[in-house]
Amino acid sequence: MRARKLIKTAVAELKASEAIDHWQKGRERIEAEDLLAFVMGGDEPDPDDRIGNAERDAFEGLIARRATGEPLPYIKGYTEFRGLELISEPGVFVPRDSSEYLAEQAVKRLRGRRSPVHVDLATGAGTIALSVANDVPKATVYGTDLSEDAVKLARRNARRLGLKVRFATGDVFGGLPKTIAGTVDVITAHPPYVAMHEVDDLPDEIKDWEPVHTLTDRSSDGLGFVRQTVAEAPAWLRPKGWLLMETDPDRARDVKNVMADGGFRDVRSTKGGDLKITRVIVGRPPA
């Protein structure tokens, strides 16, 4: 069978899936082409190329898995983020392309500092922390996560990439050495911000596959983690440091208000990157 026909059939199957969130135009074709290239060893075939029976069967199996809502990184076993190939496994938060803007904002604020220190909260597979360590080699980088599985995977990714990041298990700032209190230049977080009663409303590909603790902090408004971070961050930040939190556009105003009410200065909502579907709320600690 030719690649063109395979892709066309796969796109139709993905479009018909009720488990997938069809938020992006052309997403189904992008994913089908990605999976076919994966099956073919990394090279996307030309539309008129003939695909062997073994490769066709493997591809159709992967498409069937994706149609159930299984995230692409879980299917492939890895994901790419700002030029880094990160191992991805079930049980650990799936890195989002939209988070690249959060990493970019952190890198921009760290590069000009003499001996920068960065802390990434709810680090998951280490996505943001490793991206910062890669782009700012002189930085001392820490990552924390409540999940031991996430921290183990983050450490595996660090070893595989040859990047030095200190990962620790702990809730919010738990696990960080107290010696760095007051020395951190940038704190980043992609917090769980879905209210507990809203989890069931999420797309199947999220609620059925990703760990619940990465989606909600189980608070009534989804802002429990945000409030704790805002309350504790000033003790860790330098006076001229920054707190950067990624959130959904619908939550941006709420997160911004929590930071402002917590005494943070120069608080504003920013957006950027290729996929402008999330917001990064930035602010300086109280004077």
Image (cartoon, grey):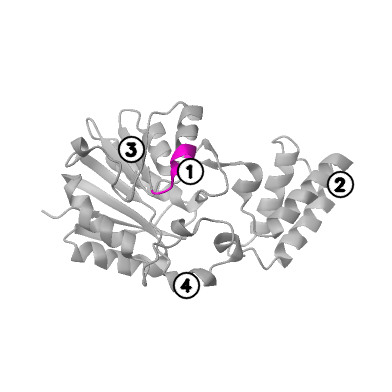
Magenta-colored span: 146-153
Residue denoted by label 4: 198
Q: Earlier in the sequence, mark 4 or mark 2?
A: 2
What main secondary structure does the magenta stretch of the protein show?
Answer: helix
Can residue 44 be seen here? Answer: no
Can residue 189 be seen here? Answer: yes
Q: Position of residue 167 (x, y in %)?
A: 37, 37
Label 1 with label 3: CB-CB less than 8 Å: no
Residue type pointed to by label 3 = Tyr
Q: Position of residue 71 (x, y in %)?
A: 61, 53
**Dot 1 surroundings within 10 Å: few (below 14), some, or many (20 or more)?**
some
Q: Is 70 inside the magenta-drawn segment?
A: no
Mark 1: which secondary structure? helix
Mark 2: which secondary structure? loop
In-front residue for pair 162/52: 162
Residue denoted by label 1: 149
